[in-house]
Amino acid sequence: MSDIDTGSQEAGDRGKTLESGMPSSEIKFIQGNEVCVEAALYAGLDFFAGYPITPSTEIAEHLSARLPQAGKTFIQMEDEIASICAIIGASLTGHKVMTATSGPGFSLMQEALGYAVMTEIPSVIVNVQRGGPSTGLPTHASQGDVNQARWGTHGDHAIITLTASNHQDVFSITVDAFNLAETYRTPVILLFDEVVGHMREKVIIPAPGQLPLVERLRTSVREGIDYHPYLPREDGRLPMSDFGGVHRYNVTGLVHDMWGFPSGNPQVVQGLLRHLVDKINNNAREIARYKTYFTEDADCMLVSYGSSARSALHVVMNRRQRGEKLGLLELQTLWPFPAHVVRDVCARAEYVVVVEMNMGQVLEQVKLAVDKAQKVFLANRIDGVFINPTDIRNILRLIQGKGV
Amino acid sequence: MERCRMVFSGSGGQGVITAAIILAEAAVLYENLTAVQSQSYGPEARGGSTRTDVIIADSTIYFPKVTQPNVLVCLTQEAYGKFYPIIRPGGMLITDPRFVRLEKKVDARQFELPMYQTVMEKIGKPIVFNICMLGAVVGITQLVKPESILKVLETRIPKNFLEMNRQALDLGLALANA
């Protein structure tokens, strides 16, 4: 399909490598949550701490079997606060870590999420979204945590948040999450949803080595020589030293200097905050993952992500057969918001319809990104029911002036 | 092939979800088809009425749920009452007369197959009722080869129970062809 382009670098090569007969790629028919597990293990996950919650439970369930089998660590914690604190600690000692939860648990994790941002500790936090607020709708579909992922923890900061709509992409984006966490020394949020988490479909588990992995950047400073945990290299990256290993250093949620000790020096404060935000937001183009379907000549551009993008794509494929010029921009990076991509792709569209299961959280970002906010509309559902192609078609008819 | 959209419904514990997973997995792993399976979650899936959606096709499946099934299986009266109105005109309705009394005429081929009774008479174990149902679905729709289902059963079912499941599958196939 020549009209389909992809924003992620690996995706284009995947088919080729498989056809050339890599022996150990494997086809599975499993739930999205299990795909996340397979991908995390592929990426080198060796420490998981979590507290099971619908609709993310299968992640903890499957890792509780898989990690110990491989001699790695799974801990069921007393709650989500302890879960995220445990993975932060484990990461600092040199492990690749993950926890998984849903809205209520993700709320509890916000304080420590800020700690991981401030202390720059690589970690992956999966939120398989359900309806909220509070305990909300445990078994129903929603995408209401987009802004919570961005601003759930307090203070100026930047964050990376990724999502996916099908199992092959859940795999590659999960591997990506681990890679970005290591590259930028940051927590990365995987924002999946109930539909993708629970449905089963085909996934090809790539052979080892097929997807690139980013490993921990460790300091070359030798034992006995002072190591500065927050002294960037020339390329801006901060090499780590496994905590409890050969170097003694301080880690704190307080604003800190290059030794990791608390500081109220305005220059240090300014420098640290700029660093925390710039290291991610200045790389928004590098971090942007997205897919485009028939966007070149589209008069009507759908913008969607996660499971909603499946319904949007269904509509696009259907209408294209009838000659209608619909296109889809599927976002896989939600934060930092890929405004440049949205702006470019939507430039010539007469109108833009954001398809999501909330009251317009990505809609607001799209409105800010395009030239004319008035041309942006929302096709949504907030009743716990997975948005379907008919819902989207009904909204399109209204916008086109055709009525119900 | 024409895209096949199926809904299996019944009560929690009857094994309709397991049957759906086995069918979809057989299509993907052994027939080079695409498939998506999803199911109702929550308390209703554990004792109440339960529903699972399966789509099998030879092209990419985007929207993963079924709104109008070509094939509807109802294994309780409650499930029948709830789901018969959504059947796609010209589709197929498969029920077991032990559990479902047909009330309305629908624009569908109706198969009333005594699956439960046959399983109890020939095998005596209700646990394989769902595999008999699966045999009937495969027999009627010809979606996948019975051997593909058997291959999945071999990977999922303990050796001691395999023969019983194979027998149940054959009973279902025979009922479909009767």
Image (spheres, coloured by chain):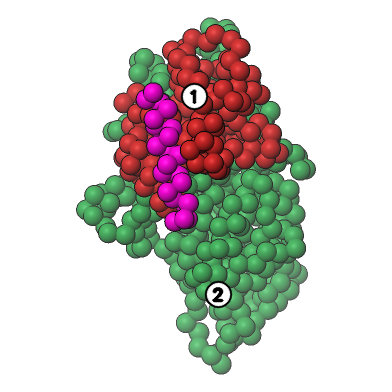
Q: Real-space Cα distance between discs 1 and 2? A: 60 Å
- Please name whichever residue, A158 or B5, is drawn nearer the observer in this view of the structure: B5
Q: Position of residue A89 (x, y in %)?
A: 65, 71
Name the residue located 47 percent from the left edge and 66 percent from the top edge. Answer: A44
Which of labels 1 and 2 is toward the front? 1
- The residue lying at 39 percent from left, 30 percent from top is B174
Numbered mark located on residue A94 in the image: 2
Please, what secondary structure does the residue beneath circle 2 have? Answer: loop
Q: Name the spot of residue B144 as percent of width and height, x first.
A: 35, 34
Q: Amino acid at mark 1?
A: Leu
Q: A291 and B125: which one is in front?
A: B125
Residue, disc 1? B113
Residue A285 can be seen, yes or no:
no
Quadrant of the image containing the C terminus of chain B: top left
Main SS category, magenta section:
helix
Rendered location of residue A153, percent (x, y): 71, 53
What residue lies at 43% left-to-right and 32% top-to-bottom? B172
Question: Under tag 1, what secondary structure?
Answer: loop
Q: Vertically, is B27 above or below B158?
A: above
Q: What span is in magenta? A: B157-178
Chain in red (letter): B
Amino acid at dot 2 = Gly
- The hue of chain A in the figure is green
Picture quadrant of residue B29: top left
Closer to the camera, A89 or A370? A89
Q: Chain of mark 2?
A: A
Note whether A139 is above or below A348 in the view shown.
below
User: Relative to A118, does residue A401 appear above or below in the rendering?
Assistant: above
Q: Chain of mark 1?
A: B
Numbered mark located on residue B78 in the image = none
Task: Please indicate, yes or no, whether residue A258 appears anywhere in the rendered image.
Answer: yes
